[in-house]
Image (cartoon, rainbow, N blue to C red):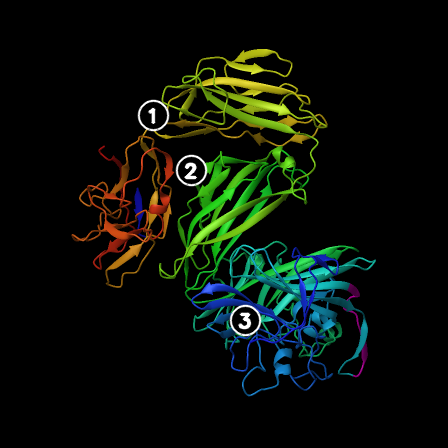
Amino acid sequence: MTFNLVCSATQTVEAQNQQSIGGIDDGIENWTQADRSQVGYLDIGGGKKLGYTFGLARDHYGRVTNGGDSTITKDSYNPKPDEYGAGDDGVDYNNMFRSKINVFLNDNNIAIGSTYQDNYSDSDVRDTLAQDSVSRTSPDFLIAPPNSRSRINTLDFSLLSQMTNKKYYVGFDSNNNKTFKIVGDFVRKPFYRQDKHKIWNKINNGNYNLTAEILLRPSPNNSAVVQRELYLHNSSGDNQELNVLFGEDTMLGTNDGIPIYDLDEKQGLYIQDYQGKYQLMVSNNVPDGFKHYKAQDYNFDGYDSNDDEDYNINYHEDNANNWVKGFDNGDLNGNGDEQYNFRYGQQLIDSTDTSYILSWGHTDLASGQTSHYVSTMGVTASGYAVPYVKKTYTNETSQDGKNHIGDRLKFTLKANNSGMKSSWLYKKLVDKMPSGLQIDPTTIRISDDDRTDKVISMTDYNDDTKTLTVPTNRSLKDGQSATVTFEANITNDAVKNLDNNSSITNKGEFTGIDNSAEDSKSEDKKFTDSSSIPIEASDYEPNFTKQVRNLTTDKNSAYMNKVAAKQDNIVEYKISYNVGYSKNYLLSGAQITDNLPEGVELTNDPVVITTPDGKISQTTTPNTTLAEIKQGETETIEFKAKVTSPIAGQVINMAKLTGANKSNGQMVGDALTNGAEVDTENVDGFVSVPDKIDFGQSNMYGKTKLLKNISTDGELIVRHPAANNFRVNVSYDNDDNRKKIQTATGDTLPTDDTGLIFIKQKSKDNKVGEWKPLLKVGTSIQSEEFSGHQDLVNLTDLVGVNDWQLKVDARAKAGAYNGKLTWTMVDSVQ
């Protein structure tokens, strides 16, 4: 194995307990109307929580409160003309009061805001003003006609400026976290305004009549992240065309002018304060997320006030901020920073008075329809990980963009750490396949930020329980991610297991621990995300299976999905293709391919094919062409194979269907059978050992260091069917030139009698463990023996991230060091 060194107010409530309000179904069924704001929190750790609410949530001294803002359902308005510096026409275009989204960090009861906010200090006792002016310079959601050439300012284009009849509701999500929403009418009509030249201009920023819902809810995957959502419902009789945007004037604590950085892969942006204490993240890593984003100077309007042509097009005064100024050519429909596909940490704007704008592009909203817009936001403190997980899929074979029986899907499960000066230990991924999905275990891969795919052992998938368990074992620092992918086919069972939305759901469960905290203070935490897969009504119902039996142990045994076998046993496989009583049947000409894997080989016995008409033929290969198979009919292929594997392991094999066509002339997507499994038994041995233990890179600065490993690639899987107990040992020999840790030029690591490499030896009752040096004769990975009769056991949890240490002496020379470990299994004497 190779080493690499490299406060609260009384409020009245009105029970609603209904799911749809204003014609909008947001998925929450327990809404209760209230007249004062409440605050929700998501725990981060160390006395720090992510807070979210509408309106004010801190007192005159900056301490957090329990909300109680009574202004949130009042009409929003812009300040008096002389209050914050209006233009020559006496209009303030840039400020808007009331009903604002407020996401903040509760740092041990001190509020660390994420947007610019004033009028809350102890010198100002006007509570109403403090409530009114929460993030007054941020418009939140903006609505504009797709062809608008006007400056997209807060007064004329913010949703809140024309939102009336507001009602506030409190609910709870499936994780029992608070959710909040404001529902009202959004009505905008053309009007006239006098400019600085005393000329009356018709202002036409669209003609809209919509129901709007602004919703705050935590991310459903258990992350300390809040989703800021907007639903628009068109109950008018006309189509409504619009562009939706979201803008904020950023601030972290007392820092107003702070740099903005890219979040990686067109996902959004993040901000850090100068002191390196706090971080804010905005992401589209969510369904219905924004398409464009731009970091920009809040004060720069992007127009030349001395240009008459520019003024005629953009009639507003010079101080009117233009929220789309940063998009290409200042165009409402232009691209932003996402077009450059920057990597994590790329600075987008320096320390000016920074702000950002998000855009979802054009929406054509027909009468009776509802549209949805989402962005996520998190605020955290230095030294805390913020894991975020996401599961998606793509259909690799569909011709019409819909999911059909037989289609092949590719799933992507990504875990990311959006923390600050942190590390998240991503331990494992568990994904249980629903009925109707057949995974192809040969396609399971994992990749890191280098985009290099690594094959995952097929033994990580249990076909009996239909569960994939991947010991990911990676330490993810800020901005780093790990991605697991696999492919699966939609089987006929999907039709029998559809939910009320004609879908099946596949959920991934990601487990990890905040590696930035001490072991005693941090615990494993699970994060989940699901993919809902709508399935089209099927006019074709195939059933494609493969089974196996052991003829050596019982020549009359029934075919099963899995059998046990020894070396030299003869097993027999049976492939079946059946068409149910559906509208269409299978035309002749489809190809069956079955290439046996290493560990079994085809015997010289004939391959027997039984066609739907009952005719039996013989051939020399299971790769064949199917006959026409009508409704209720089946074709089978049977053949024998010899078990050649002398070591413990699983031999999993699938057959593949290609080139199939239905009787209506449409193609059938490529399909796979289930995995027929042959388990070689009564053989003690290693199925797999880790490929690499990576200790990362380190600058020594003339000091001796103990480096913990940042990842373990590969898995430790053993078989021990024998009855006696056993130990698994790992050894290192620093005197063996073939195995000792050294560079390509022969430089070695100085060591002493205390040891060079250490493993955290754990016990059954103590998972913290004790550090033990690796010895030439071997060091047990667990203090107690393992019990016998272990057919297949995965011990990767004992050799994962932070389970290894490398002692690097101050005298070590710079370089890339590699070495080898030896694994042994030792039986106890009975």
Q: Quadrant of the C terminus?
A: top left
Graded by Cα atoms within 10 Å as few (under 14), some (14 to 19) or many (20 or more), the crowding at tag 3 reads many
The reply to whether the magenta stretch includes residue 296 is no
Query: Can you say whether 489 is above or below 751 in the image?
Result: above
Q: Are marks 1 and 2 in contact (CB under 8 Å)?
A: no
For the record, the magenta segment spans 198-209
Q: Residue 637: x percent and y percent?
A: 55, 18
Q: CA distance from mark 1 to mark 2?
A: 19 Å
Ranked by sequence position, the earlier of labels 1 and 2 is 2
Is 657 drawn above or below residue 347 in the view shown?
A: above
**Of residues 413 and 290, the one drawn nearer to the viewer in this rendering:** 413
Q: Which mark is residue 423?
A: none
**C-alpha gap between disc 3 and disc 1:** 62 Å
Disc 1: which residue: 646
Of the numbered discs 3 and 1, the one sitting upstream in the chain is 3
Residue located 49% across and 17% down the image: 639
Find the distance from the CA under tag 3 to the CA under tag 2. 44 Å
Q: Amino acid at mark 1?
A: Pro
Q: Which mark is residue 114?
A: 3
The residue sitting at the right extreme is 237
